[in-house]
Amino acid sequence: MTDSNRLRIAIQKSGRLSKESQKLLKGCGVKFNVNEQRLIAHADNMPIDLLRVRDDDIPGLVMDGVVDLGFIGENVLEEEQIERETLGKPAAYNKLRQLDFGGCRLSLAVPKEFSYQDASSLEGLRIATSYPNLLRRYMQQKGITYSDCMLKGSVEVAPRAGLADGICDLVSTGATLEANGLYETDVIYRSKACLIQSAEQQTPAKQALIDKLLSRMNGVISARE
Ligand code: ATP
Ligand code: ZN
């Protein structure tokens, strides 16, 4: 059981955001030890519990008010928000600040031999992605119709496997695209990690703790700029 008097913060269990999220919390003076086998890590010196979960679960946990704060990539956050708005589920949250890690972009990419002019070259074709909502929003803005191929992983191999004509995937250096014979054509979303808070009313004590953490975080981040 989690104690509702303690601040609940969701962080990615393991992946590209987990080490930096933990480092930032430690930099804010939160003392904790993570046991790889455990879902929850209790802070020793502040009333804070860390919930270690898949990053995809974090926006929903915050929007449902199950946790108070979450460290999450803006790409995953925005994708979940559009999904929930479409389904009429709670989608409100407050973004406390953007963070200085987790930078990447969501881009369209096509095989090297594809003669690409602009996004309309994809008209009527099939695009593999793990971000169907962000892709739809971009293609709707451009007035382009296309088909989806929803893949949670291995998106970059979809064209070679004959599953799709192009992809919409996260890119940082471009090395994965290159290794799969693809090239980046359109950046559809630029992302960094961010800290979000549930839209629910907090008790004064919890809100004071959030404010303290945020002010320390601003100090830590501006010191390393
Ligand atoms: P989980 O097991 O938690 O679901 P995952 O495999 O979905 O993990 P990661 O690959 O760890 O996620 O990426 C988490 C986040 O890191 C991404 O959603 C994105 O915001 C950010 N990120 C930064 N650079 C990259 C990159 N090159 N590729 C993918 N994600 C990146
Ligand atoms: Zn994930």
Image (cartoon, rainbow, N blue to C red):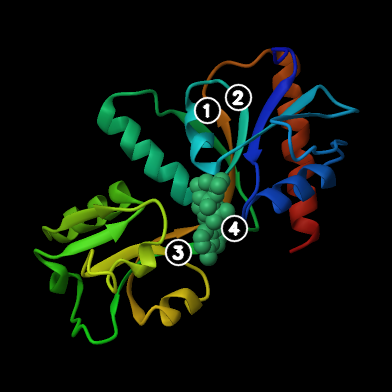
Q: Residue placed at 29% from the left, 74% from the top? A: 160
| Cβ–Cβ under 8 Å for marks 2 and 1 | yes
Q: CA distance from mark 1 to mark 3?
A: 24 Å
From the viewer's perspective, is 123 left or right of 116? left
Q: CA distance from mark 4 to mark 1?
A: 20 Å
Q: Earlier in the sequence, mark 4 or mark 2?
A: 2
The amino acid beneath tag 4 is: Gly
Disc marking residue 67 = 2
The amino acid beneath tag 1 is: Leu
In-front residue for pair 39/216: 39
Check disc 3 and report the residue beneath it: 105
The amino acid beneath tag 3 is: Arg
In-front residue for pair 192/172: 172
Disc marking residue 61 = 1
Residue 111, placed above or below residue 223: below
Looking at the picture, how far across and down is residue 156, in whole percent? Answer: 38, 68
Looking at the picture, how far across and down is residue 112, in whole percent? Answer: 29, 85
